[in-house]
Amino acid sequence: MSSWITPPECGATGIGGLPHTDPRQACDDVLEAFPKFPYVPTLPNRGLMESIVFCDSTSLPGGIVHDGRLGIDPSRDAGSEMEKIYLDFMEKNVSPYARTDRNASAFFEMAKRDFSSAAILKCQVTGPVTFGMQVVDADRRPLYYDDQYADVISKMIALIARWCEEAMRQFSGVKETLVVLNEPYLASLGSSVVPIRQENVTAGWEDIAGMVEGGIGIHCCANTDWSYLMGLNPSFLSFDAFTCSRELLLYMDDLVEFMERGGVVAWGLVPARPEDFSKVTPDSLFQQFSAIRQQVADSCSDDLFMKQSVVTPTCGIQTGDPSQAREIMGAAAALSDRARAGRPK
């Protein structure tokens, strides 16, 4: 069963992807920016198999990549492959769901690093909703609308997440791990255009949260039903606070209760797109953070807000170049330092 993580005290970390193609440089840059709360980046510019969904697709029953798209091969015996996932899930047999250098080059580069300054290590996997909505069957219908596939995908992701946390714990020696589900499609909750059944989301979440032992989080970079997501009790809720903080703060009572239970909120205030980042300044970012801090502190103690907060970029930094990514990560770290300055020890 998943657990809360130690309050990060308004530290800083990163989110998901980087534009690098050299995993060594990517890991160097992450560890320089976030030595206390590092994360394993994804490097989609290295190739298709390191991009979202594809990087977690190697065990998909019937899965096939054709013309740059992930789909289902009707000639495969998907049923027997599903049975294997169900059996592995029951037995917590995670070894078949290991990541490889082909789909997670930075993961294996991170395994060579020194984490003596880190208290926690984070990685990201594709969430089951986003995975199931991105992959279609032979009739071009999203797999998530097939109840059996929705169920088996959640269990497959649970096994991948468990393998990731075990591997991170083993190679890093850190006390805590955090696996974050990348779930942009959760923005469709409540939508009549792209309907997502809440009961399927809950069932999938329970599969994953019941499989992992460390922290488990959710990253959704657009507006969604925040009350529902906080009610799932993720250890870590990550979102684009630069554009969506007003919407989240409408759920103030839920937010305060979430933090009081031990939930951490990752305030994604530093724009991840270089063209947006060029329009902000350290002062404007600090002013936006301070406004959020004051609004939340009107409903709870400032101490609680600071304890249960993290500063991050808005999303993965997948455009631009490595030097721009370093600037964005550095700005998140600097904002964290400025926010913490003068706070009672």
Image (cartoon, rainbow, N blue to C red):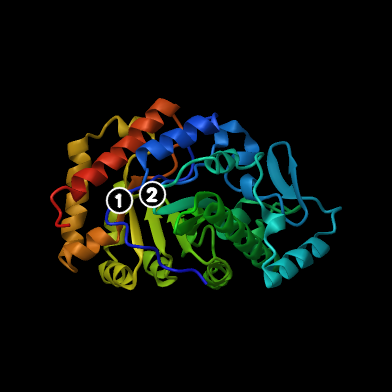
Label 2 element class:
loop
Residue type at tag 1: Gly
Is mark 2 in CB contact (under 8 Å) with mark 1? Answer: yes
Q: Which residue is located at x 34 percent, y 39 percent? A: 271
Report which residue position mark 2 lands on: 37
Label 1 element class:
strand
Q: Quadrant of the C terminus?
A: bottom left
Q: Is residue 123 above or below residue 216?
A: above
Report which residue position mark 1 lands on: 11
Residue type at tag 2: Phe
Nearer to the camera, 136 or 31: 31
Relative side of 269 to 65, left or right: left
Picture mark count: 2
Q: Which mark is residue 233?
A: none
For marks 2 and 1, the one nearer the N-term is: 1
Find residue 144 and report its horizontal and vertical position in percent: 63, 61
Find residue 110 and report its horizontal and vertical position in percent: 52, 41
Find residue 96 and report its horizontal and vertical position in percent: 72, 56
Q: Is residue 236 above or below residue 256?
A: above
Q: Which residue is located at x 51 percent, y 51 percent? A: 124
Neighbours of disc 2 within 10 Å: few (<14), some (14-19), many (20+):
many
Q: CA distance from mark 2 to mark 1?
A: 7 Å
Find residue 343 and report its horizontal and vertical position in percent: 15, 54
Work out whether residue 223 can be spotted: no
Q: Is residue 111 above or below residue 306?
A: above
Neighbours of disc 1 within 10 Å: few (<14), some (14-19), many (20+):
many
Work out whether residue 10 can be spotted: yes
Q: Which residue is located at x 17 percent, y 45 percent? A: 287
